[in-house]
Image: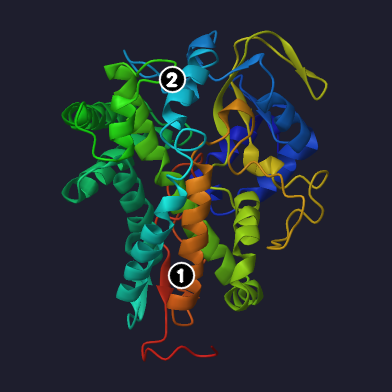
Amino acid sequence: MSPETLFRRITDYANRADPYPLYAELREHGVTRQEDGRYLVGTYYEINALLHDPRVSSDLRNRTAPDPEFQPPEGGLPSFIGLDDPEHHRLRGLAMRQFGPPHTPGRVDALRDDIARIAGELADRLRGKDRLDLVDDFAFPLPVTVICDLLGVPEEDVQQMHLWADTAIKSLDFAPGEDPGPRRRASQEARVAMGAYLGELAAKRRGHPTGDMLSGLVNDDGPDGRLTEVELMVTTVLLLIAGHETTVNLITNGMLTLLRHPEELERLRAHPELMPSAVEELLRYEPPVQFLPQRTPLTDIEVGGVTVPKGVPLILVLASGNRDPLRFPDADRFDPTREDNQHFGFGSGIHNCFGAPLARIETQIALTTLLHGLDTPRLLEDPPPYRTSPVLRGSRHLPLAQAADGVQAGR
């Protein structure tokens, strides 16, 4: 088939369960111009160079024509992941002061015990159940509880946070030929509602901190000052959405991969010290973020021998780069002990996911807990039903069966 139809085929829901043959086709053709004018890049070294190239913008307002699928928020400030330096650096730095070193070096590590407790409680509820949905019963409740606890969202409002976040994420759900207007409007409404809620919560903690990240953001007088009210709302919405959505998919994709590789599952059960390496391999092999659609050249640039014009949509297919055999030997093999594993699971460059340390800890604890807490689990559907989004790829449900008698066989 024509390489100009690759993006249409990649985003076709019929290919959601296994997009990797299409990524292999993309790598064969190098940088490809699509029928709608977009340019796709799927090879590791070209993606890596572009992620570190200051001539490539993350701000959609730099496009010469509106993109029918990806547009900046209507009448609002983009979050820092949709901005370039110096504004990106300022806003990201203000958020990072409350998340990690050097200002709050122990915040994430301090969550380990709470994450293990929540994971253990969720796993305990699954004991004796002969049927379960790993997404609804475990993979969603864990990270959404953790990120809400980190920000300081009251327990009774956690479910509302999830509903808003789920609606906001649907802005990335699309199918070829679909009118994106309704989902984009619903997404914007959900973000505004979530931002208003978090802004009000933050206002109550201004001058009365309660030790959570939201209190830190609203009361911090660092060298770059404080976030404005609008910046605070936009940043906290980003943290809440990004802080759980991708981790849900990472845990779910991880368990699905392990169940498809039972020998590796048993090895990790016997040697839990291998789990950190296994999570890095899962980030390479089945990443929750498949591609970055929001890149735009600020000038004509040459990529892989192809000139990409200024202002056109440039899509970096991270999941394709992660399977590039020129970078990773035996790239289509899942190898939990793989060394030299510089994947794009969290991106790279100045926009590298700053929540990566938390996502790593959550996933390591989650999968270790599941391997020892579930009773000889097996897949009831393979492939399982996937979410609509081709960007944040993950199972919508992961139906599993386990031994009904509660006796853990083969342990």
Identify the element where label 1 is drawn.
Answer: helix
Tell which of 268 and 31 is nearer to you: 268
Whether residue 169 is visible to the viewer of this picture, yes or no, is no
Image quarter hosting the N terminus? top right
In the image, is 21 to the left or to the right of 84? right
Q: Which residue is drawn at 37% across and 71% down?
A: 123
> Can you say whether 344 is above or below 304 in the image?
below
Q: Are marks 1 and 2 in contact (CB under 8 Å)?
A: no
In the image, is 202 to the left or to the right of 232? left
> Can you say whether 143 is above or below 118 in the image?
above
Identified by mark 1, the residue type is Thr
Label 2 CA crowd tier, 10 Å (few <14, some 14–19, many 20+): some
Image mark for residue 71: 2
Image mark for residue 166: none
Tell which of 271 and 382 is nearer to you: 271
In the image, is 2 to the left or to the right of 68? right
Whether residue 172 is visible to the viewer of this picture, yes or no, is yes
> Can you say whether 231 is above or below 134 in the image?
above
The residues bearing labels 1 and 2 have C-alpha atoms spaced at a distance of: 40 Å
Identified by mark 2, the residue type is Gln
Q: Mark 1 points at which residue?
A: 369
Location of residue 75 (image quadrant): top left
**Residue 273 drawn at (x, y percent):** 62, 68
Tell which of 228 and 212 is nearer to you: 212
**Residue 7 drawn at (x, y percent):** 60, 33
